Structure formats: C-alpha cells, structure tokens
C-alpha cells in the first residue's frame, strides 16, 4: 500500500530524493493523515506541516491518503528496503499510544 501511495506522487516529489527518501516522505504523510483530525482540532496541523522538509507535497499526500485509504489507520513505525522488497512495520493507534505512555513512564525515549 505504501508503494501505491508514494507512486501516486512520484512525479511531484523532488528528483534528488532517493528511493528510500520517497518512502520516508510517504510515511510522514501517512502518519500525518492519521493524526490530522487531532492536530486540526488543536490548530497544530499547519505547524506540523512546516516542520517537514516537503510540506506542500505532504499536505497533498495527506488529503489523498484520507480520501483513498481512510480505513487504514495504523501508524508506520519504520520501513526497510532490500532489493525490490519493501518491509513496513506498523502499529495500531492504540498500541502506539500505549507504547509511548509506557516509555514515558519508564523514562525511555519513544520511537
């Protein structure tokens, strides 16, 4: 799904980006889309966008993700590319929140 998502914006992403960089942008957009409602309600979405290196394209990707993949709300934790294979590690929003809270309680930095 991440490949399909990123491929939709391939022409709009800067040519200087590596294959892995495009997935990094895609993962940021995917996770931002999953948090957009929360961020919008707190007037933080635009601030979050400005923190990214490619805010305009991420904003378009967020809208696309919400339109085409609204039912998929897992958080992308990491991904690996090996040859022509992409491995994506995700976590449900609830498990992600619980892991963050557990790490805060234990004093460990969150992923």
Image (spheres, rainbow, N blue to C red):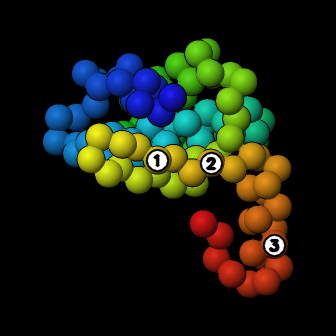
Crowdedness near tag 1: few (<14), some (14–19) or many (≥20) residues, C-alpha within 10 Å: few
Task: Identify the residue shown where x is 57% and y is 51%.
Answer: 89
The numbered mark, 1 or 3, whose residue comes first in the sequence reads 1
**What's the mark number on residue 90?**
2
For marks 2 and 1, give the CA distance: 10 Å
Quadrant where the C terminus sits is: bottom right
Task: Identify the residue shown where x is 79% and y is 55%.
Answer: 95
- In the displayed structure, 7 sits above or below 80; it is above
Task: Identify the residue shown where x is 32% and y is 51%.
Answer: 82
Q: Position of residue 56 (x, y in %)?
A: 40, 30
**Quadrant in the rendering for residue 34:** top right
Q: Position of residue 63 (x, y in %)?
A: 56, 21
According to the picture, the residue beneath numbered tag 1 turns out to be 87
- In the displayed structure, 105 sits above or below 62; it is below
Local SS, label 2 = strand
User: Does 13 sit left or right of 40 as displayed?
Assistant: left
According to the picture, the residue beneath numbered tag 3 turns out to be 102
- In the displayed structure, 57 sits above or below 86; it is above
């Amino acid at each position: 799904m991440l490949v399909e998502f990123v491929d939709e914006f391939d022409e709009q992403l800067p040519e200087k980006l590596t294959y892995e960089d495009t997935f990094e942008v895609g993962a940021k957009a995917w996770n931002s889309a999953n948090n957009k409602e929360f961020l919008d309600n707190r007037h933080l979405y635009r601030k979050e966008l400005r923190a990214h290196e490619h805010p305009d394209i991420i904003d378009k990707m967020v809208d696309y993700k919400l339109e085409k993949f609204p039912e998929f709300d897992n958080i992308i934790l990491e991904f690996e590319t090996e040859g022509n294979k992409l491995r994506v590690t995700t976590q449900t929003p609830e498990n992600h929140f619980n892991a963050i809270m557990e790490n805060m309680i234990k004093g460990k930095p969150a992923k």
